Structures are given as structure tokens and as C-alpha cells.
Image (spheres, coloured by chain):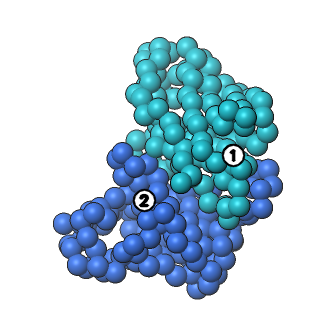
Amino acid sequence: QKEVEQNSGPLSVPEGAIASLNCTYSDRGSQSFFWYRQYSGKSPELIMFIYSNGDKEDGRFTAQLNKASQYVSLLIRDSQPSDSATYLCAVKYGGSQGNLIFGKGTKLSVKP
Amino acid sequence: DAGITQSPRYKITETGRQVTLMCHQTWSHSYMFWYRQDLGHGLRLIYYSAAADITDKGEVPDGYVVSRSKTENFPLTLESATRSQTSVYFCASNSAAGGLEGLDEQFFGPGTRLTVL
């Protein structure tokens, strides 16, 4: 059974702080890793993807991938109240036809 | 409208009725997906399609039927709705599944909130 695990939260951080979201996955053959943000009542939207070990930065967001430890994380610097949402980790496992396995999501709350 | 759309956005039906949820995308993406999202379960794949006339089961296909006669449309039918199928349904699409960087992203429709009484 291919699984993607996330801490459900809620994770609460003060405005301006760094929010750290973590995700582990079970399939060592996984190839691609995605972070989606989902506001309440809305559909998921992609904010980051990462394919290679290491860090990938995009504005205030940094995705980190460690394939040996089978974890991927998302750091949000200078967190804003508008970052309050549920963050979904998704993994494309090896041999799939584009299918993604989603974690259950971590709810982030940024307090002003 | 460009993008991926779903209809209806909200639907209330009764147990035993047949319901069809529509999904339409204007990108000519090869792959399309149907998910359901429930509290405590996250997003679960119901069915997916690699191209017109090619469909396959996902994690939770029981009670659902799909078809894909045209690339742009991917309807999901609940043949005899049950209360356990009350959920939010999302359709998604992507252009390629070959692992090429940047092409694996799935784009989601706005969702259909279905209530089965």
C-alpha cells in the first residue's frame, strides 16, 4: 500500500514566523513530489513541485526533498494570515500513469 | 471559459437515484482524474483516464461509472447513489505523465458538493 503521511495539525504560527510542514512517503520508487494549498471550500492549487534531492526555492516557499529518508517538507518564510489553509503533499510513485497519492493534509493557521 | 469546469457545483439527491457529475477541460490534456474528498480521508482517486476511451480504476471505484468519448469531457456517474457517497468531488487533468519536469502537475476543477439524502 503506497502511503503519504502528514501531520494533520492544526499547526499554528505567528505572523512573520517560519511554518514548517512535513510529509513522508512509503514508496522508494516515487519520482515527483508536489505541495498543494487548499483554502476552505476551494479546490487544491499547486504551489511547489520538486524532483531532485535538496532544496527548491520559490519566493517565500522552499520545498526540501530527501529521498533516502523518504520525506519532503515545505517551509513558508514570513508567514502571512493569507497563508492559512490546508497544505496537501502529493507523490507520484514509480510506474504510475500520472496518478498522485495525496496525504490528508496539514491545516496551517497564521495568527496576526 | 478556459480551464477545467465542473457541473453542477452543488447537488442534492436521494438514495437510489442516478447522478452524473460533469467535467470539462479546454486544454486538451490527455489525463483526467476524479477524486472524492472527505474529512479524515483526504483526496482519494475514484477513476482516471489516460485518453479518450481509456479509463481505469483508482482507489475507491465501487458504485461509480465513468466514460470518456471525447478528450475534453470526463463524466462521473453514480448509478444508484448511497449516503456514503455524500462528498466533495474534484475533477483534475494533466498534460503528460512521462515524468518530465513540470508536466506532472494536476489542475483541479472547482469541485461538486454532492449530498445524498
Which residue lies at the image location 62% right of the left edge and 25% below the top edge?
A75
Looking at the picture, how far across and down is residue B11, in whole percent?
30, 66
Image quadrant where one finds the C terminus of chain A: top left
Camera-near label (1 vs 2) is 1
Q: In which quarter of the image is residue B36?
A: bottom left
Q: Name the residue under label 1.
A: A28
Chain given the colour blue: B
User: Looking at the picture, does residue A33 appear above or below residue A54?
Assistant: below
Q: Residues within 10 Å of mark 2 (few under 14, many from 20)?
A: many
Residues B94 and B79: in front is B79
Tell me the SS state at disc 2: strand
Looking at the picture, how far across and down is residue B13, in whole percent?
24, 71
Residue B80 visible to the viewer: yes
Q: Mark 1 lies on which chain?
A: A
Q: Which amino acid does label 2 sit on?
A: Arg
- Distance, label 1 to label 2, CA atoms, is 26 Å
Which residue lies at the image location 24% right of the left edge and 65% below the top edge?
B83
User: Looking at the picture, does residue B25 appear above or below residue B38?
Assistant: below
Tell me the SS state at disc 1: loop
Chain given the colour cyan: A
Viewed as shown, does residue A29 lie left or right of A18? right
Looking at the picture, how far across and down is residue A24, in whole percent?
58, 37
Viewed as shown, does residue B62 lie left or right of A53? left
Q: Name the residue under label 2.
A: B36
